């Protein structure tokens, strides 16, 4: 697309990294589609946040370092940001799913939190929103 | 950039679009609300990766900033929706 010529090793490296990242993203999404229960499905997208994101980030790094001037360290920023924020979201989602499964009376492990000792006993007052 | 690398990047974009279609199917048919939130989070990640691949394809760093914004809003919105599922409201 542009006029800056890339060396052959950079092209091969970028192609391998981008194809690997895209394949891993497809694998994670396919796992999200095909796995049976929610607690199995929540594992599938984390491979995108780790391996897929890092592979495509390194491809971006190699490309902008080979074409531009100096190291393209700004590409590292997005992978570090994803690595920090995605576990927070996943933990929140799993806690929400456990909470809702306990509410529905399904067979899940009981709560180990000492702040709310007996969660299923006072489920009636918490149904109404507090406003 | 040689012609075969353009084809390889287009193939990677096609794989990412296929991945987004998988998450869209889970988003539409997900039996519970947390399934839909998880599928939306995964779709944000796939879109961000597609933005990075587009930035390589067009050799422009504008797409990088778009990807950073998508990552930021994806994290914030998924956390807010998970908090809503957990508590019934976002900010207590």
Image (spheres, coloured by chain):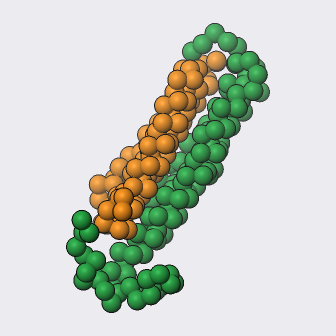
Chain colours: A green, B orange
Horizontal arrangement in the rendering, residue B53 relative to residue A33 (left or right): right
**Foreground of the two, B80 or A108:** B80
Q: Give the x, y percent position of residue A14.
A: 67, 31
Task: Tell me if residue A57 comes above or below residue A38 in the rendering.
Answer: above
Horizontal arrangement in the rendering, residue A101 relative to residue A109 (left or right): left
Q: Give the x, y percent position of residue A113.
A: 50, 81
The answer to whether residue B51 of the structure is visible from this angle is no
The quadrant of the image that shows the C terminus of chain B is bottom left
Q: Give the x, y percent position of residue A127.
A: 25, 76
Q: Quadrant of residue A102?
A: bottom left
**Foreground of the two, A88 or A27:** A88
Q: Give the x, y percent position of residue A86.
A: 54, 54
Q: Quadrant of residue A103?
A: bottom left
**Foreground of the two, B4 or B74:** B74
Q: What residue is drawn where x is 50% and y is 42%?
A: B71
Marker count (numbered)? 0
Q: What residue is drawn where x is 60% and y is 40%?
A: A78
Q: What residue is drawn where x is 72% and y is 25%?
A: A65
The quadrant of the image that shows the N terminus of chain B is top right
Task: Tell me if residue A66 comes above or below residue A57 in the rendering.
Answer: above
In the picture as drawn, the residue positioned furthest to the top comes out as A3
The answer to whether residue B70 of the structure is visible from this angle is yes
Task: Tell me if residue A83 comes above or below residue A131 in the rendering.
Answer: above
Q: What residue is drawn where x is 67% and y is 24%?
A: A64
């Amino acid at each position: 697309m542009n006029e800056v010529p890339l060396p052959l090793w950079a092209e091969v490296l970028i192609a391998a990294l981008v194809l690997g990242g895209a394949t891993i993203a497809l694998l994670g999404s396919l796992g999200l589609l095909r796995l049976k229960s929610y607690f199995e499905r929540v594992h599938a997208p984390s491979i995108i946040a780790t391996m897929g994101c890092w592979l495509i980030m390194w491809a971006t790094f190699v490309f902008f370092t080979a074409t531009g001037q100096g190291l393209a360290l700004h590409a590292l920023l997005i992978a570090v940001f994803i690595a920090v924020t995605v576990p927070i979201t996943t933990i929140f989602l799993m806690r929400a799913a456990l909470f809702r499964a306990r509410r529905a009376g399904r067979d899940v492990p009981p709560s180990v939190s000492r702040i709310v000792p007996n969660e299923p006993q006072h489920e009636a007052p918490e149904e109404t929103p507090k406003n | 950039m040689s012609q075969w690398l353009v084809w390889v990047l287009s193939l990677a974009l096609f794989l990412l679009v296929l991945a987004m279609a998988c998450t869209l199917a889970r988003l539409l048919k997900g039996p519970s609300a947390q399934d839909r939130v998880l599928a939306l989070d995964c779709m944000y990640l796939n879109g961000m990766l597609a933005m990075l691949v587009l930035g390589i394809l067009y050799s422009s760093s504008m797409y990088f900033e778009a990807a950073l914004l998508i990552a930021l809003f994806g994290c914030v919105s998924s956390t807010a929706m998970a908090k809503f599922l957990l508590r019934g409201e976002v900010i207590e």
